[in-house]
Image (tube, rainbow, N blue to C red):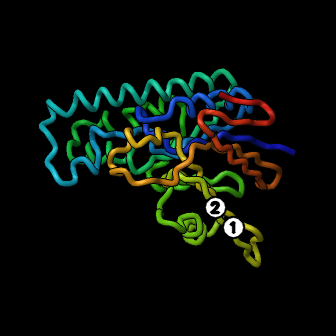
């Protein structure tokens, strides 16, 4: 018996998202009609408060920085609105947001300017008002026998590392590529980790910080179905050049 079904989306990095990939996910929500929606974080790029941008140089005065932050917040919220509209249309009321490391840059900005509490990631994107259950960066969400987090480890063996560190079925984003690692425990049976790719624009033009280096990123999202007893099935849906197929329906 099916208990619940979720759409899970990885790193979007608005406004540096891939609009074709995002449109595929929006259409998938219409097809799947999930009861649960899980956003794995790095919702915004947050270049205006980037931990990389200001790693080696001083932040500008607030009167110069705030207009840029406000512009980025408005752009991110417009994209979140697109998802909320479709989720409302299909009656999906259980919504979760798991803050990512980029999202945490907004919180770091507020730590430096504690009188600007409206700029925390939670407040700037109105997650409470939108009806999302909020998880701070690296906090774990568990539904049935599957857990979710933004992602804590990188490197070639990140899927193995996530499974070994968390010791349970775990789904995450952060690394932008698609991967799976499984093992069998004597008492628990088979457990797996899933890296879910991203929805970011993967072009060299958008990602100049790579300085021409090639990457292994993938556009993808997940469908998770839970059965009685917390058991579950994971479907990783690859998006290739703005195209995907879900349950026999072509999405573009």
Q: Residues within 10 Å of mark 2 (few under 14, many from 20)?
A: many
For the C terminus, the quadrant is top right
175 left or right, relative to 113:
right
Quarter of the image with the N terminus in it: top right
Residue 203, numbered label:
none
Q: Which residue shows up at 43% across the image and 34% down it?
A: 14
x and y percent of residue 164 in the render? 59, 72
Q: Sequence order check: which comes first, mark 2 or mark 1?
A: 1
Q: Residue at x 32, y 48 (%)?
A: 209
| Above or below: residue 75 compared with residue 168 | above
Q: Are marks 2 and 1 in contact (CB under 8 Å)?
A: yes
- Residue topped by disc 1: 182
For this view, does 21 lie left or right of residue 15? right
Label at residue 193: 2
The reply to whether residue 252 is in sight is yes
Percent of width and height locating residue 132:
54, 36
The residue shown at (43%, 27%) is 77
Residue 149 x, y percent position in the rendering: 54, 54
Q: Is 192 on the left-hand or right-hand side of 195?
A: right
Quadrant in the rendering for residue 87: top right
Q: Secondary structure at mark 1?
A: strand
Question: Measuring 58% from the left and 41% from the top, which residue is drawn there?
Answer: 9
Q: Position of residue 177 (x, y in %)?
A: 55, 53
Based on the displayed image, in which of its 4 quarters is residue 107 positioned? Answer: top left
Mark 1, other Cα within 10 Å: few <14 / some 14–19 / many ≥20 = some
């Amino acid at each position: 018996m099916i208990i619940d079904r979720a759409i899970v989306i990885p790193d979007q990095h608005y406004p540096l998202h891939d609009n074709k990939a995002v449109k595929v996910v929006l259409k998938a929500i219409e097809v799947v009609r999930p009861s649960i929606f899980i956003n794995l974080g790095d919702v915004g790029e947050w270049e205006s408060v980037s931990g990389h941008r200001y790693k080696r140089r001083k932040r500008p005065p607030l009167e110069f920085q705030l207009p840029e932050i406000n512009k980025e917040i408005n752009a991110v919220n417009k994209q979140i609105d697109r998802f909320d509209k479709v989720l409302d249309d299909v009656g999906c009321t259980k919504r979760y947001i798991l803050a990512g490391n980029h999202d945490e840059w907004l919180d770091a900005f507020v730590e430096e300017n504690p009188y600007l509490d409206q700029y925390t990631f939670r407040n700037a994107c109105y997650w409470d008002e939108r009806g999302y259950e909020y998880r701070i960066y690296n906090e774990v969400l568990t539904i049935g026998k599957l857990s979710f987090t933004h992602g804590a480890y990188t490197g070639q063996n990140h899927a193995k590392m996530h499974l070994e560190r968390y010791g349970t079925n775990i789904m995450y984003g952060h690394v932008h590529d698609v991967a799976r690692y499984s093992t069998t425990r004597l008492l628990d049976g088979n457990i797996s980790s899933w890296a879910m790719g991203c929805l970011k624009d993967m072009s060299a033009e958008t990602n100049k910080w790579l300085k021409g280096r090639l990457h292994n990123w993938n556009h993808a999202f997940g469908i998770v179905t839970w059965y009685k007893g917390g058991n579950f099935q994971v479907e990783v849906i690859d998006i290739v050049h703005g195209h995907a197929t879900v349950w026999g329906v072509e999405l573009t």
